[in-house]
Amino acid sequence: MFSELDDIKNNIENFEAVSFAVFYHDVIYNAVSKSNEEKSAEVARKNLQKLGFDSTFIQKVSDQIIATKFHKQSDDNDINYLLDADLSILGSESEKYVSYTQKIRKEYSIYPDLLYKPGRKKVLEHFLKSESIFKTEYFKEKYELRARENISSEIESLS
């Protein structure tokens, strides 16, 4: 994510906050938990307080981390850049994307194919139904077409 954001850091209002959000957004991760983002945001809040950051900055980082839960368009462009960087893997070259999908499957290996495939397909179809997967023009231009191709291909492989 950092390499994706580095090219556009001048477009980001508060690159320091976004950087902390990138670092902390998956610090707590459990494939079966529905509260990873909240727990990660709490870890970030505690650590940033210890480092002496002010409450406004800490809230900004926390809000950015929480935003990664649903990937909704935001009025805050920094959040949109963070979300797009988080999804940039979807628009990667085919080999890299296939490797990513294998890691996702391994991550959710506790679920048999009977449950995993329909669930994964539902998530992927949600992306395809949206007007755009990416929220910023930069990431739309860079990854939208390839992401749709990768997702469509993965859906086919799940059938």
Image: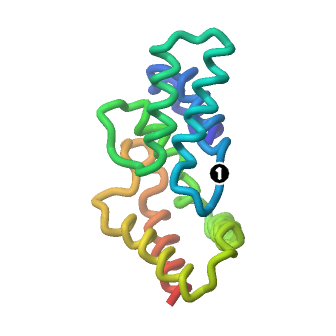
- Asked whether, in this view, residue 117 is left or right of residue 49, the answer is left
What residue is rendered at 46% in x and 24% in y? 60
Q: Mark 1 points at which residue?
A: 29
Front residue of 38 and 147: 38
Give the camera-side residue of 125 and 68.
68
113 left or right of 137 in image? right
Residue at (33% x, 44% y) in the render: 73
Q: Is residue 120 above or below residue 54?
A: below
Q: Is residue 139 above or below residue 116?
A: above
| Most foreground residue, 58 or 96 | 58
What percent of the width, then of the height, locates residue 109?
A: 69, 75
Does residue 54 sit above or below 129 in this rendering?
A: above
Coordinates of residue 121 in the picture (x, y in percent)? 46, 77
- The quadrant in which residue 39 appears is top right
Q: Tell me what residue is drawn at x 52 percent, y 20 percent.
A: 58
User: How many marks can you see?
Assistant: 1
Q: Residue 103 lies in what quarter of the image? A: bottom right
Left or right: 26 with respect to 18? right
| Residue 152 percent location from the top left of the image | 46, 76
